Amino acid sequence: MRVTLGEALRRAGIEPREARLLLAQAAGIPESRIVAHPEQPLEESSRARFDDWAARRRLGEPVAYLTGRREFYGLSLSVTPAVLIPRHESELLVEQALAVLPREGQARVLDLGTGSGALALAIKHARPAFEVVAVEASAAALAVARGNARTLGLEVDWRLGTWFAGLRGEHFDAIVSNPPYVACDDPHLTRGDLRFEPRTALDGGIDGLEAIRVIVAQAPTHLAPGGWLLLEHGSEQGLAVRTLLAQAGLERISTWRDLAGQERVSGASRAPEGAPVDQSEAPG
């Protein structure tokens, strides 16, 4: 027996906003039609797909993995369980990278631990003239990123590797990264969406700073004079990250807050050649 759109929503047993999104995807229709015409019959194949997705969502599986899509910085990205789901909070990292880089002309940008390619592709889309290099240790994740680049028609130099391995002698005007920064014993790793996401993209060791320490220590040798290192981190890690940046000899150390008012991105620059050390606050 066929059911209507409204009936399918009522029996989904999940949050209404998510139910509308999943039903729209399952039926191949805009959400506005569901709201405007809840009496419209739902095709059996669409109903079966939606019921399956709703059941999996009730068990906690992320919506992005169910639909295989996630929007980030205005781009529609393919996502799979091989990659971390891009968060809107990470858009701040893109915004700050664009703020410290030239609006016109060329620049070299490096994205470490690219995952779905969200950061690299957002920067390349905003600044087509830039040369963007993206590194990822997971071959499966890199395949997702490459697929997103093909779909979007954006050219990025994708590299398989761990952090700066394979980049000897290369320098960049900006290095960005959303590295693993959750402490390995953090209970959030066993709750909600995080249970389904790749552990290697989340687990930052005992204090969550293991990957950040490696990146900060090695970044100065890969930054062009005046180049920037920008890192996403946990809301309570700002002070620790700023300390690491200072210990690495970088300048203009600063932290930016996300829309929720939480410290989310910290960054610093390498001094221009022949310039005195400048510890003034970064632009932003």
Image (cartoon, rainbow, N blue to C red):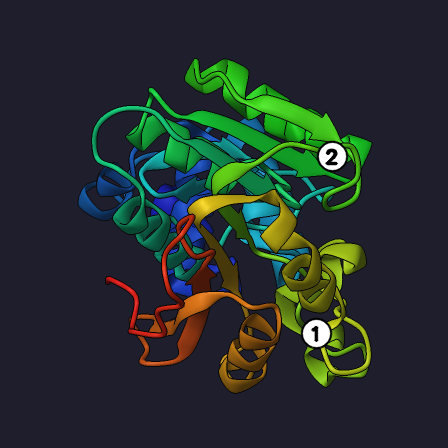
Q: Are marks 1 and 2 in contact (CB under 8 Å)?
A: no
Name which residue type carries label 2. Arg
Tell me if I can see residue 175 in this picture.
Answer: yes
Image-quadrant location for residue 260: bottom left
For disc 1, the marked residue is 209
What is the crowding at mark 1: few (fewer than 14 residues within 10 Å), some, or many (at least 20)?
many
Give the amino acid at mark 1.
Leu
Residue 72 is left or right of residue 235, and the answer is: left
Q: Quarter of the image containing the C terminus?
A: bottom left
Identify the residue shown where x is 26% and y is 37%.
102
Residue occupied by mark 2: 168
Q: Which percent across, then down, holds residue 280?
A: 29, 74
**Could you tell me residue 175's position as x and y percent?**
52, 47
Q: Residue at x 34, y 43 (%)?
A: 73
Q: Secondary structure at mark 2?
A: loop
Camera sees residue 55: no
Q: Which mark is residue 122?
A: none
Residue 242, above or below 8? below
Quadrant hosting residue 31: top left
User: Residue 215, position in %: x, y?
Assistant: 67, 58
Front-lying residue, 234 or 211: 211
Identify the residue at horizontal 39%, vertical 36% (top origin): 123
Callout 1: SS = loop
Q: Position of residue 133 (x, y in %)?
A: 57, 29
* Mark-to-mark CA distance, 1 and 2: 24 Å
Q: How many marks?
A: 2
Comes first in the chain, label 1 or label 2 = 2
Q: Is 266 on the left-hand or right-hand side of 199?
A: left
Residue 78 lies, with reference to residue 52, above or below; the image says: above
For the point 71% across and 38% down, which residue is it?
A: 136
Quadrant including the N terminus: top right
Q: Residues within 10 Å of mark 2 (few under 14, many from 20)?
A: few
